[in-house]
Amino acid sequence: MIMESLNHQLKLNPQIFELSVKQQAIRDGFGEGLVIAGENDNQVVTVCSDLSESTRVDKFAEKFPNRFIQVGVAEQNLASVASGLAAMGKIPFITSYAIFSPGRNWEQIRTTICYNNQNVKIVGSHAGVSVGPDGGSHQALEDIAITRVIPRMTVLVPTDAEEAKKATLAAAKIKGPVYLRLARHKTPIITTSETPFVISQANVLIESLNPEALIIACGPMVWQALMAAKTLLAEGLSVTVVNCHSIKPIDSKTIVKLASQAGAVVTAEEHQIIGGLGSAVAEILALEHPVPMEFVGVDDKFGQSGTPAELFDHYSLTAKDIIRAVRRVIKRKNI
Amino acid sequence: MIYLTDDKVKYLEQMANEIRQLVINMLMTAGSGHTAGSLGMADIMTILFFDILKHNPQDPAWPERDRLILSNGHICPVLYATMAKVGYFPITELESLRQFGSRLQGHPQREYLPGLETSSGPLGSGLSQAVGMALADRMDSGRSSDRFFYCLLSDGEIQSGQTFEAMMLAGKEKLHNLIAIVDRNNIQIDGFTEEVMPLEPLTSKFKAFNWQTIVVNGHNFEEINDAIWQAKSIFGQPAVIIANTIPGKGVRDFEWKFEWHGKPPSTKEGKEALKELRTMWGKLKGNE
């Protein structure tokens, strides 16, 4: 039943709902995309701050040693060196953990990249609690908020490795600063090479005729949203599910249209509720079509050590939490 | 190495004096802005734009140009005045400094004014950008490029960690095409640099990061000229010119006083300053 409700035009992975669904880390897709971007355009360069293997730029470095710059543990320099490279026509991808870039070097990103209007791609890996055992110091939960607030910045949160590859290629093609958010651990593959990826166009994964709620998710939470939809649908409650991979520019048109059909919205993200995807959606709906909303995300807390599954459970980021939020929001709609 | 002729030195001295007068007028009109550093760097800015830089004011985007990266964006009045004087835009436009709609923003914004290489103001990030540009140039042209990348920075901003990150990378990459010029005027907003946060021994710091260092009197055109040619000839290292300058140089009441770091002259103070500079100009003319 759930398979029939999938948007077939998107040519999604037919194994999405199977236990044996293929899993791959989102950062792997970035690494593959970066090599292709490097082959497509010899102006693409990579600047790395001591995390080349874990941010998956090692393949690029092997293939294009003359277009790879190692700056060491120096994230502020990382951002501004990239600004200088871009001023000379290069297309720099700068990589680190999201907590350090755009975390530690936010002002350099704002001033020397965005205010200065330079064509730099900022890649933050290891975002979210799914970093796991490394603990709260390394789990970036604020990066969407601090990047989307900067004028000129495009913010992309791919949902799986396949989409990360496409997002990398799309980022290389557009002119201007882009923040690309990646996760460390393996997550189910939702899309295929044939699934379209267009910046600023959300993908409607499940569209229902008479939906009772709209679920908008990004990153690894899209899979949790699909699992929630499967359960809800089996119980006879129909929902629409959107993969909102572009946080900025956001697909206002699709969100407003679907929110007005459903009359209630739940957002889901592996990020602080404050300032993330949910806030971006609320900003649009408050203006264009106010409906009851519920926010699934981290509720003003820091992360901690644990397995990704334990942490998703602890911070209420699972399909079950989305289901509860859907039930709550539907109740509020009928008041 | 090209030596300066006596005539050239006189020409540059007069030009720098006129630029200082423009700076005073701009700051008086604007009613805010940074006086000390702008006056102190007038000589270096003058020799760069009128003698050293490979550039074309009629074609600011000329790809083969040298790049001048102003890291300490707050001294932009002297950058704007020099650019106007050398022909990038009309001198009358200088009056618009810091006003709404002006191309001359309070701190430089690259997109507002052709000829600016970067937007700066927040201190400590200019050297990194210059390093990025110099790296890109070497990637494209190897050592065959004859473009140079000049980064002007204040002494105070060397207190920021990012400057050291950039120094380390430039040393590692042996960027022969990078020349940093430090405005060593010993002052910052809160007082004397050596009291706020000592920078000495400054040359040792650069040396420790594998830079060539040259120390000059930042008001002596011949010394500055020789240092730049020396820096250009160094093959396997980036070079830094530590230019000892007098903050507020040219106006006795402003000289050496950190209080003049971030404020403009009042109308009365400005008029006095202009009078003093004009008298100085008369002296210079008399030497001809």
Image (tube, grey):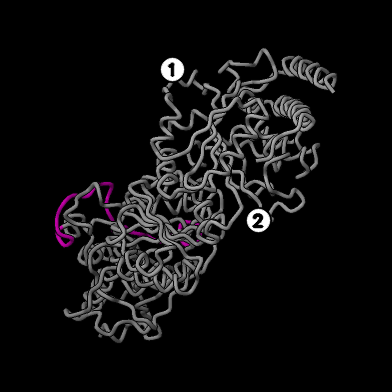
Can residue A232 be seen in this snapshot? yes
- Subunit of mark 2? B
State the CA–CA distance, disc 1 to disc 2. Answer: 42 Å
Q: Which of marks 1 and 2 is in front?
A: 2
Provide the residue span drawn in magenta.
Answer: A286-310
Compared to residue A238, the image places residue B224 above or below, namely: above
Q: Report the front residue among B213 and B164.
A: B213
Binning the other alpha carbons within 10 Å of mark 1 as few (below 14), some (14 to 19) or many (20 upward) gives few
Residue found 54% across the figure and 55% down from its top: A118
User: Foreground residue, A275 or A194?
Assistant: A194
Q: Do labels 1 and 2 share a chain?
A: yes
User: At which x and y percent is residue B203?
Assistant: 45, 29
Residue B144 got which mark?
Answer: none
- At label 1, the amino acid type is Glu
Q: Classify residue B153 as left or right of residue B99.
A: left
Label 1 element class:
helix
Tell me the kind of residue under disc 2.
Answer: Glu
Within 10 Å of disc 2 (Cα), the crowding (few <14, some 14-19, many 20+) is few
Relative image position of residue B261 (x, y in whole percent)? 58, 23
Residue B64 tag number: 2
Give the percent coordinates (x, y) of residue A269: 31, 60
Is residue B100 shown left or right of residue B197? right
- Could you tell me which quadrant the N terminus of chain B lies in? top right
- List the residue tagged with mark 1: B195
